[in-house]
Image: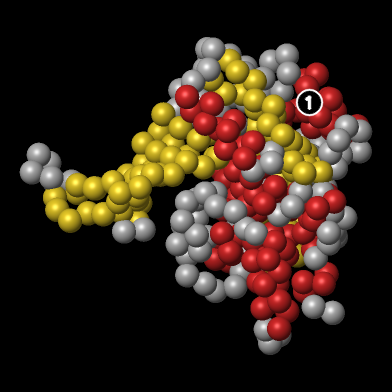
Amino acid sequence: MSAAATLPDLTRARVLVVGDVMLDRYWFGDVSRISPEAPVPIVKVESTEERPGGAANVARNAAALGARVALLSVVGFDEAGDTLARLLAAEGIEANLHRDPTVATTVKLRVIARRQHALRVDFDIAPSHEVLAGKLADFDRMLGDCGVVVLSDYGKGGLAHIAEMIGRARSRGKAVLVDPKGGDYSKYAGATVVTPNQAELREVVGHWRSEEDLAARAERLRRELALDALLLTRSEQGMTLFDAGGVTYERARAREVSDVTGAGDTVIGTLAVMLASGASLAEAMRVANHAAGIVVGKLGTAVVQPEELRAELEIAESAPRT
C-alpha cells in the first residue's frame, strides 16, 4: 500500500484554532547599490504581498489541507485587521475576529532582496489588558463543531485564559494541541500535546547532555503537566515524540532550506488535521514532519497543498530503508 493511500480523508477534519494572529507583509525587490547616507543596502521594491501570520497561519495551513477551520482571535480596529479578515475569508476560514479599539493588530514587515531577508520590521504593541476576556462563551460555542483544538501562543496576550480553555475542551473530549511560548509551561497542564522546538524546550528543562538525558527531562515534564505527549521539533534533525509508550523519532529528509518562517505553524496545523481525521499521533507526527520539510523550501509563511504532501509521502515510501 502506498503512503498516499494511507493518508486519511483530510476533508473530514474539523479544527478550531485560538490564539494570537498577525499580518505578515512582504516587500520583494533587488539590491544594486549601497546607500550614500549610511552603509546599508538600498532595496528597490518591485512587488508586495500580504499573508496571514501567527495563529492565522496555523488556520491557513489546516484549511489548505482540506479541513474545515474556525479561528478565534482579537484584532484592532485598523487597516491590518481589515486585511486579515479579508485574507482569511478568501481561504474559507470561519474567522471570529473580535475587534478591540484599544489594541493594534500585530504586523510583521519583511523586506526580501534576491530571496534573502534584508530586514524585518515589527509593529507590535503588547495590549494593556487581556484581549480575550469575556470571549470564553464564543470558545464554548465553537468547541461543539470541532474535533481538535489548537492553541497557538505567540505571547501577544490572546491566551491569558489558556488553562481554562484547555480544561473546557478536554472535559468535552476534544484533543488540545499547544504551540508554546515562554518559560512557564504550567499553564499548558492537561493538554493533549505540546509542540516546542529545541530552543523553547531548553528554556523550560535546561540543556540536555545526551539523548537519554533529553528523554528523561521530557518525560519528567510530560508527567508534571499531565500531557498525553510532548512533540519536540528539531529542524534538520526531524522530530521526537515523547509519550507513555516511550520515545519515537522521525528523521527529516535532507533538502535545501529556503526559509523556516512559519514552519512550526505548518507542523501543528498538519498534526491537528491528521488527528481530526482519525490518524494516530505517531502517524500524524510522520506526516507533519514531511509537511514541514516541504514548507521550509518555500519563502515566508507558506502552506502545503494535499497533492504536495501525497507526492512527498510517495517519495518517502519508495526510498530505500536504512
Residue visible at 80% across and 78% down?
Answer: 2
Which one is nearer the viewer's eye here, 226 or 216? 226
Number of callouts:
1
Q: For mark 1, give the secondary structure.
A: helix
Mark 1 sits on what residue?
Answer: 139
Asked whether, in this view, residue 295 is left or right of residue 225, the answer is left
| Residue 163, placed above or below residue 34 | above
Give the amino acid type for the residue marked by disc 1 in the picture: Phe
Asked whether, in this view, residue 308 is left or right of residue 317, the answer is left
- Residue 103, how many percent across, how many down? 52, 17
- Residue 68, how many percent across, how many down? 77, 44
Q: Quadrant of the N terminus?
A: bottom right
| Residue 282, placed above or below residue 134 | below
Q: Residue furthest front?
A: 90
Residue visible at 47% across and 41% down?
Answer: 50
- Residue 200, how many percent across, how many down? 57, 45
Which one is nearer the viewer's eye here, 137 or 69? 69
Determine which quarter of the picture holds residue 293: bottom right
Q: Quadrant of the C terminus?
A: bottom right
Q: Is residue 163 visible?
A: yes
Which one is nearer the viewer's eye here, 121 or 43? 43
Which one is nearer the viewer's eye here, 205 or 310? 310
Residue visible at 60% across and 50% down?
Answer: 264
Residue visible at 47% across and 70% down?
Answer: 256
| Residue 102, placed above or below residue 92 | above
Determine which quarter of the picture holds residue 280: bottom right
Q: Residue furthest right?
A: 172
Badge 1: few (under 14), some or many (20 or more) residues near its Cα, within 10 Å?
many
Which colouring convention does the figure follow? secondary structure
Determine which quarter of the picture holds residue 244: bottom right
Asked whether, in this view, residue 98 is left or right of residue 33, the answer is right
- Residue 214, how many percent across, how many down? 65, 57
